[in-house]
Amino acid sequence: MVAAPRQRFVAALCAGYHEARSLACELRADAGRGPYPQHSEALLALADRADGQASALAGELGRLGSAPDHPPPATAGHRGRNHWERLTVDLARVQESTKRYLELAHHWDTTFAESAATLTRLANDTRDIERTIGDLVAQSDPYASD
């Protein structure tokens, strides 16, 4: 049985919500393990932005008469040998989120126009997060151990 369009869209928003919450948790964990104090501050600020994205997605779900289930975000186990590797994992996750937000916005722009506008805004915000993490990667030593 094929799910109705609204159900598919709600499921996609829930997945985005959980990804944003998980990313926020990972960024906070990375901030606590990083060797550079200025990186820790930046990662904590980015984690707050990821939480804001999760809140925006929860708001969209609420507007659609739904809500995300709230299991604790699963954190990945071993995500890299050092700060640089963890940042590259974070960067890849954020790039995937940007792509997903844009794909959802384009796919659902006529059916759920208000939500598509929110997704486009989130994609733009995520691109900014990408740039910041990319800068942190460039400032990090790929050969340093923790």
Image (cartoon, helix red, strand yellow):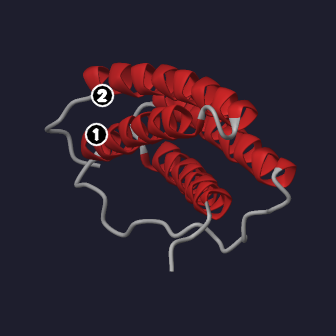
**Most foreground residue, 27 or 144:** 27
Instruction: Tell me the number on the disc at residue 110.
Output: none
Q: Amino acid at mark 2?
A: Val
Question: How would you rate the neighbour count of disc 2 (Cα within 10 Å): few for under 14, some for 14-19, many for 20 or more?
Answer: many
User: Could you tell me how far apart the alpha carbons at marks 1 and 2 are, in whole angstroms?
Assistant: 7 Å
Residue at 68 percent of width and 44 percent of height: 51
Q: Secondary structure at mark 2?
A: helix
Q: Secondary structure at mark 1?
A: helix
**Residue located beneath label 1 in the image:** 88
| Residue 71 spot, x, y in % from top left | 67, 74
Residue at 58 percent of width and 26 percent of height: 120
N-term mark: 1 or 2: 1
- Tag 1 near tag 2, CB within 8 Å: yes
| Residue 20 spot, x, y in % from top left | 58, 49
Instruction: Tell me the number on the disc at residue 137.
Output: 2
Q: Tell me the quarter of the picture where residue 73 sits.
A: bottom right
| Residue 8 spot, x, y in % from top left | 58, 61
**Most foreground residue, 23 or 36:** 23
Residue at 58 percent of width and 39 percent of height: 108
| Residue 43 spot, x, y in % from top left | 53, 35
**Most foreground residue, 110 or 94:** 110
Q: Amino acid at mark 1?
A: Thr
